[in-house]
Amino acid sequence: MAEDKKGTKLIADNRKARHDYFVIETYEAGIELFGTEVKSIRAGGVNLKDSYCEIDEGEMFALGVHISPYEQGNIFNREPLRPKKLLMHKREIMKLTGLVSREGYTLVPLSLYFKGSRVKMAVGLCKGKKLYDKRDSIAKRDADRDIERAMKTH
């Protein structure tokens, strides 16, 4: 868990999204949660894998975000995969609606983090990678790693 000087603490990172998509732009969104969900997130019970965002009637929702039920939550626990409402400015949502509908972009949750005491989500405006793009990314990463090793040994 990384922490920097602004008081942000990384909770979960969606590394699969960076593998499957080109991230064009990132946006910060608040996320509407219940108390037991926040407690479960603090305990590390969150998974962003295979999650995505959808805009419905001017509101943005994160779907497929799994927040495990809080162990001491009893009747107050919510459904782990329920749609979570994202809180953004209306003009940002309208801009994203246009881009997603016209140009074939996708909205993908990239990370979940604490900013102060609030839970925030980094949402990426992404374009899908083809198989050969993924292979290029892997080859470039491996080449960079080999260069780093060679520089350390010399």
Image (cartoon, rainbow, N blue to C red):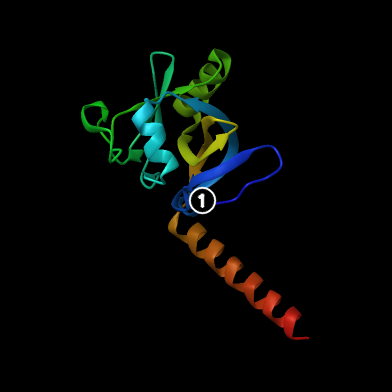
**Residue 134 sits above or below residue 55 on the image:** below
Q: Which residue is mark 1?
A: 18
Q: Is residue 103 left or right of residue 66?
A: right
**Which secondary structure lies at badge 1?**
helix
Instruction: Estimate the x, y position of residue 65 in percent, counting from the top left.
Output: 36, 38
Label 1 sits on what residue type? Arg
Instruction: Estimate the x, y position of residue 81 in percent, counting from the top left.
Output: 28, 35
Q: Nearer the viewer, residue 99 or 61?
A: 61
Q: Nearer the viewer, residue 85 or 118?
A: 118
Q: Nearer the viewer, residue 55 or 72?
A: 72
Instruction: Estimate the x, y position of residue 60 in percent, counting from the top left.
Output: 43, 22
Given the current orientation, which residue lies at the most extreme right position?
154
Instruction: Estimate the x, y position of residue 111 in percent, counting from the top left.
Output: 51, 42
Q: Is residue 27 left or right of residue 67?
A: right
Q: Could you tell me which residue is drawn at 25 percent across and 32 percent down?
A: 79
Q: Is residue 135 left or right of residue 78?
A: right
Given the current orientation, which residue lies at the most extreme left position?
75
Q: Could you tell me which residue is drawn at 73 percent across and 85 percent down?
A: 153
Q: Nearer the viewer, residue 107 or 43?
A: 43
**Residue 150 sits above or below residue 97 on the image:** below
Q: Which quarter of the picture shows residue 66? A: top left
Q: Residues within 10 Å of mark 1 (few under 14, many from 20)?
A: some
Q: Could you tell me which residue is drawn at 26 percent across and 30 percent down?
A: 77
Q: Could you tell me which residue is drawn at 48 percent across and 53 percent down?
A: 15
**Residue 74 sits above or below residue 135 on the image:** above
Q: Which quarter of the picture shows residue 26? A: top right
